[in-house]
Image (cartoon, rainbow, N blue to C red):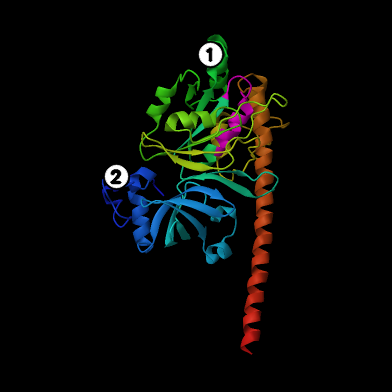
């Protein structure tokens, strides 16, 4: 769905009460396209809201009227084919309010983008990180977290999801300027066409440039490991102490988990920001062209390989291998590409097998219910 705000003058029609100090639908990112879908699918009798938090299949939904604790209908749970069919932070939903602060979600609006990864420890299963995101801020600290391989994983996740990436290099006050310049040079030589912004939560370097990127009604998401400064950055951008902050564990040298759940925050300057817990694993859940966009130079060269089914590992006449040998393609980039492509292939085959089994199980359950109903009639 096109998520442009075309038709925004009709956005508030039938969307709760309006008043001089009341939250407007546009403040949550609501668009004319969403209102059109709402009308065409006969959802006008239900309230419309956005999922701002999720905890064990219970959801906090924000509307123009306030926040409601909500759960999905039994029918939604029964017909869901996978976890992707359940609401996620950032989703727009149609809900029925049945008591003070309580509601039932009846419908999830189509998503224009969805950030997802392979669920940790669950082969072939997808974990939705955030829905309806315009831009992802990929945060890496320059003192100990700087890792180009991981950045390429985040970029693939964004490209597969239709989300624009921006790289934020945090904690730049901890290193000297010449070292920072060298880091940026190495990064931009390997990762092209992606904005890179150095920032410091201590000195607030880069803050004004970052705030200029954030537009009213647009949704942003922060992705990164624990301890890179995401929570502190969110506190500064919001002007409130919304998230606890933590440092680096001395014993492990790794960041401590501070954010324990995903949450959608409305910023004073008008943008919408989704914070995510730190991720140590960024498993491939790319069934589209995410890898092709991230490794566009490798895929462009692959068109000139002698064999159409070239694996780019040992074949004679492989244009990719020739480019690696000539130094046109960085060896680390090539190695990371092979590893991620292998993961993608494995994920796709595992997911297909999982869905085949789930479909078979669903058919068995439906057949059982049909036979049970017939038995009771007789």
Tell me the number on the disc at residue 21.
2
Task: Sort mark 1 into few (<14), some (14-19) or many (20+) by Cα contacts within 10 Å.
Answer: few
Q: In this orientation, which residue lies closer to the viewer: 311 or 237?
A: 237
Magenta-colored stretch includes residue 142: yes
N-terminal of the two: label 2 or label 1? 2
Q: Nearer the viewer, residue 117 or 129?
A: 129
Q: What residue do we see at 69% from left, 34% from top? A: 339
- Verify whether residue 149 appears in magenta: yes
Which residue of the protein is positioned furthest toward the bottom in this rendering?
378
In the rendered structure, the answer to whether residue 291 lies left or right of residue 165 reads right
Q: Is residue 97 above or below residue 23?
A: below
State the CA–CA distance, disc 2 to disc 1: 46 Å
Estimate the x, y position of residue 323 in percent, counting from the top left: 63, 23
Q: Residues within 10 Å of mark 2 (few under 14, many from 20)?
A: few
Tell me which segment is drawn in magenta: 141-157
User: Can residue 4 be seen by looking at this rendering?
Assistant: no
Q: Is residue 23 left or right of residue 198?
A: left
Give the mark count: 2
- Residue plotted at (58% across, 27% down): 228
What SS does tag 1 mark? Answer: helix
Residue ID for mark 1? 181
How far from the left and from the top, in percent, is residue 206?
45, 21
User: From the viewer's perspective, is the residue at label 2 or at label 1 nearer?
Assistant: 2
Residue located farthest toward the front when viewing the structure as drawn: 100
Residue 181 makes an appearance in the image: yes
- The quarter in which the C terminus is drawn is bottom right
Depth order, front residue of 290/85: 85
């Amino acid at each position: 769905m096109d998520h442009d705000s075309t038709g925004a003058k009709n956005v508030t029609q039938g969307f709760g009460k309006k008043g001089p100090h009341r939250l407007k639908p546009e403040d949550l990112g609501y668009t004319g396209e969403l209102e059109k879908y709402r009308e065409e699918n006969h959802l006008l009798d239900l309230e419309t809201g956005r999922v701002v938090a999720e905890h064990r299949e219970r959801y906090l939904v924000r509307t123009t009227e306030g926040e409601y604790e909500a759960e999905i209908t039994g029918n939604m749970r029964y017909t869901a084919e996978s976890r992707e069919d359940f609401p996620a932070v950032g989703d727009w939903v149609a809900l029925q309010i049945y008591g003070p602060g309580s509601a039932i979600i009846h419908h999830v609006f189509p998503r224009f983008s969805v950030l997802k990864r392979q669920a940790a420890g669950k082969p072939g299963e997808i974990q939705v990180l955030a829905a309806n995101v315009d831009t992802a801020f990929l945060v890496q600290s320059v003192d100990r977290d700087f890792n180009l391989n991981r950045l390429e994983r985040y970029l693939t996740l964004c490209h597969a999801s239709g989300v624009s990436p921006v790289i934020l290099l945090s904690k730049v006050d901890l290193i000297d300027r010449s070292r920072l310049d060298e880091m940026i040079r190495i990064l931009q030589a390997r990762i092209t066409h992606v904005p890179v912004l150095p920032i410091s939560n201590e000195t607030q370097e880069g803050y004004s440039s970052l705030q200029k990127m954030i537009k009213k009604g647009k949704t942003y998401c922060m992705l990164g490991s624990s301890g890179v400064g995401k929570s502190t950055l969110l506190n500064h951008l919001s002007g409130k102490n919304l998230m606890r902050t933590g440092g680096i564990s001395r014993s492990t040298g790794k960041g401590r988990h501070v954010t324990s759940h995903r949450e959608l925050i409305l910023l004073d300057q008008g943008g919408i920001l989704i914070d995510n817990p730190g991720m140590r694993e960024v498993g491939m859940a790319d069934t589209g062209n995410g890898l092709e966009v991230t490794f566009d130079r490798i895929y462009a060269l692959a068109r000139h390989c002698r064999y159409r089914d070239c694996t780019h590992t040992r074949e004679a006449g492989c244009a990719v291998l020739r480019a690696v040998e000539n130094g046109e393609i960085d060896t680390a980039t090539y190695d990371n590409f092979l590893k991620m492509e292998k993961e993608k292939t494995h994920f796709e085959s595992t997911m297909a097998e999982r869905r085949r089994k789930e479909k078979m199980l669903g058919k068995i359950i439906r057949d059982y219910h049909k036979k049970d109903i017939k038995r009771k009639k007789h």
